Amino acid sequence: MIAVSVNQSTGARERGRDDPGCRRYCASRCARADARSAALRRPRPRARGAAPSAARRAPWLCAFLAAAAPLAAQVPSPQSVLGFRPGADSLLASWSQIAGYLGRLAAASPRVRLDTIGPTTQGRPYLLVTISDSANLARRSSLMAAQRRLADPRTLDSATEARLVASQPAVVLISCAIHSTEIASSLMSLELAYRLATDSALGAALGNVVVLLVPSANPDGIDIVGEWYRRTRGTAFDGTSPPWLYNTYAGHDDNRDWFMVTQLETQHLTRVLYRMWFPEVVYDIHQTGGDGSRLFLPPFDDPVDPNLDGALVEAIGHVGTAMATALADAGRAGVEHRAHFDLWWHGGNRSAPVRHNMIGILSEAASVRIASPVLLRPGELHQPERGVSFPLPWAGGWWRLRDIVDYELIASEALVRTAAAERAEFVRRFVRAGRRAVAAGFAESPRFYLIPPAQRDEGARLQLANLLIATGIEISRARAPFTADGRAYAAGTLVIPLAQPFRSHVKDLFERQVYPERRVYPGGPLIPPYDVAGWTLPLTMAVAVDSVRGAVAADVQRVDTLAVTPGRVVGAGDVVLLANRSNAEATAVWRALSGGATVEFAPQPFDAAGRTWPQGTLVVRGGRAALSRAAIELGLNATAVARLPSAAGTLTLRRAPRVGLYRSRNGSADEGWTRWVLERLGVPYTSLSDSAMRAGNLRPRFDVVVLPSESPGQIRNGRPAGSAPPEYTGGLGAAGIESLRAFLRAGGTVVALDQASLFAIEDLAAPSTVVAGGRGPREARNSSRFGAPGSIFEVVVDRAHPLASGMDSVAAIFFESSPVLDAAPGGRAVLSYRSEGSPLLSGFVEGAQVLAGRAALIDAPVGAGRVILFGFSPQHRAQTNGTFKLLTNALLYGAAQAGRTIPGR
Ligand SMILES: [Zn+2]
């Protein structure tokens, strides 16, 4: 086989190794590929040091492509190429070794094909291995086309359906090690690929199955974790996690991006799932804590999301049980069902596919210490009691990486055999689930979602539509005005019919979640959801979406992607007025400030250009040229006037805010998401390590320091001594805290996000109190009968405060066990919960009365500076476009306030 890469934008065109796209990707290094491929065939020496630079990574694709050229006819085993057996104690394969082996395998086996789907965030090749019998691989294109038709039964007549049910192989996607410390499955994938390529019984099954194997859903993390492991192996820190994120931005949240599709890695696999292959089964392989059951497999725990197809819930249990039975038959004990992994949450690599009529399987193996074995004596085990969900307890003893590989290999092979044996049922079930979705879309309300144009943030509206399209949702645009349910809609309205096969996905993203109250025993503690309880995108993204009960008779055109319409600055003059409604306006403001403009927060409403502008309007002077360019690129519209006198007391920015962003050694995903959101918005920042914070002298260099969400203990203490080499332990410590206090005394602004607000109150004397909520040890003090583990709340906005510039009078915020605050004298609440009723919009809350009248955003002066306390997550997993503005406002406002003091004083 010749390895090919697939066109990133459409996934449709295939490319050979001489493809110009490959050459562009590989820069000038292709010439060295052959020499490097020879090196790949040997076990690589132990790598040391930090994550490799981009310059070192770029050649790998070339090397892997070269390694994939036809070699020996004999199919090489993983051990023969790696130099060790996958799962051997203390040995991990680098991504180039994994890619090199799979290239050799694809070159030698007619059952194996290797594709590069695109580059990872750090530039490594994201790989997809397609494994089936050679006849199926030879008709791969027609199989993909048939899967597309099976996924959309509206395209199937009964004769075609019968033919495909009789002939089409089942398609099973197996995704490994999206969480990179859960690394066994990447090693397992090599052995699985080899066995599928060489084992005669499995080979027979491959007539009925196409296996899509993703050796890692986060290739960068394989090396980030692998290099850390090799560096610390045999030391006192053997088996610890690296002190940084293993996915550049998302870290462990890389498996929470499956409807938002912000990261390259998510985009690649999403394209495989909903544009290329439409598999019937998606198996997502994970690991969990080390002292419980050896492996979780479905059936899942309650509750079941109301949008999941009941037959699919049964099928998930059926397939999970078949996999578990194979493990029991093989004498592998300790398999558990119905553990706390629920069927509620949307956003994971097994939960998004279920909403696309696919059987989503999760397994969670007990971990070792990365690759180092652990010894568990019976007293150290915390297994569930023996029962129908745990029929075969594990006796304890040594638990090794190879044990995990064995369990996952047995489970994966059982999945392939089950899919082969029940091929027709899998295919038919997929079609029928799609048919039921379409029928429900006609029969039940709502029948349509409409997304009107002219919203507060056109960028968010387009992003929402594009993420739906990327995940297989059919969207059309009205070419002319129309009415629906008695309301008038303009041309340009986006029309989403619910009578489409992936109805569950869009319906679940658009409607409000009502998480059922579940308790350990009647009157007892709540059973929290596995992940967040609510995720309604029109709320978090602040995009107005209408539900329509009746028919929609509109002249529509199907859209494949939506791009911004260029905007402009209208009116004569160099004073540009920005209502600051969209996030693109924040981007434009930063560009104008960087180009020498000044920006004022209008301190009260004013009349200009024939209309009244609200308090908080951004008045940009000297930035018209930059704003005009931004208007075209970002699709925003603004108004210019010739002159506008500044009111007394106007808060003015004379340069772009100088932003420091704290980056702890705890590997905070919230820090990564903050970086992601700031970079998307074009907001420059400087990352500040613990040592940089401890070194002090922050005020001459920064106007604003942002503390991402971490508990006070994590910020103060960082990683405990003994958990990592000394240079990575300890947090801010006394020196770092004193440095922040000095920054505040000198007029700087600290922006504390979510849990970090607790730190700001306890250690920086921010004048506020914590009423309830917040994670960590102080929770017990405050949290009697209050809890909201991931919900969307409504708050009232004080629009008279500059922090609320551009916001509406109410806002939806994302609250995940966040601190509930009260402003003490001197502080001012900018966002508040209403004094009556529950603020719950989506998800779950217990004890909502605790929130009544409390604050969710506080501007708190401290010394000559100020602390801005967020009692929620304004940038939660890059999903909350509706509150990004509060973060950018905090940076602008904080810097403007800091500008009133003299740096360094
Ligand atoms: Zn995991």
Image (cartoon, rainbow, N blue to C red):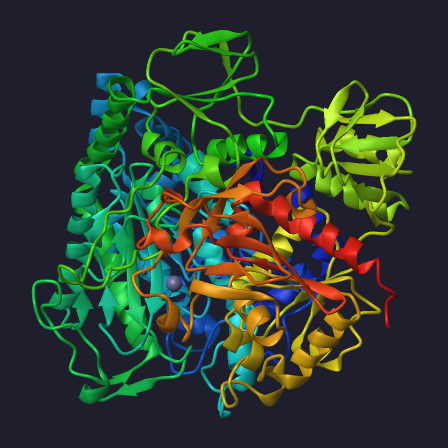
In the foreground, 570 or 785: 785
- Residue drawn at point x = 46 percent, y = 27 percent: 545
Q: Is residue 82 above or below residue 120?
A: below
Q: Which quarter is ligand 1 in?
A: bottom left
Where is residue 373? Give x, y as percent: 35, 84
List the single residue furthest toward the front.
825
Q: Quarter of the image holding residue 186?
A: bottom left
- Residue drawn at point x = 34 percent, y = 24 percent: 500
Q: Quick check: 158 left or right of 819?
A: left
- Residue drawn at point x = 75 percent, y = 76 percent: 742
Q: Is residue 308 above or below residue 594?
A: above
- Residue drawn at point x = 78 percent, y = 56 percent: 897
Where is residue 688? Give x, y as percent: 70, 70
Where is residue 514? Give x, y as percent: 29, 42
Classify the position of the C terminus by image quarter. bottom right
In the foreground, 132 or 546: 546
Q: Quick check: 422 left or right of 796?
A: left
Residue 72 appears in view? no
Q: Quick check: 897 left or right of 6?
A: right
In the foreground, 219 or 249: 249
Q: Is residue 489 above or below residue 603?
A: above
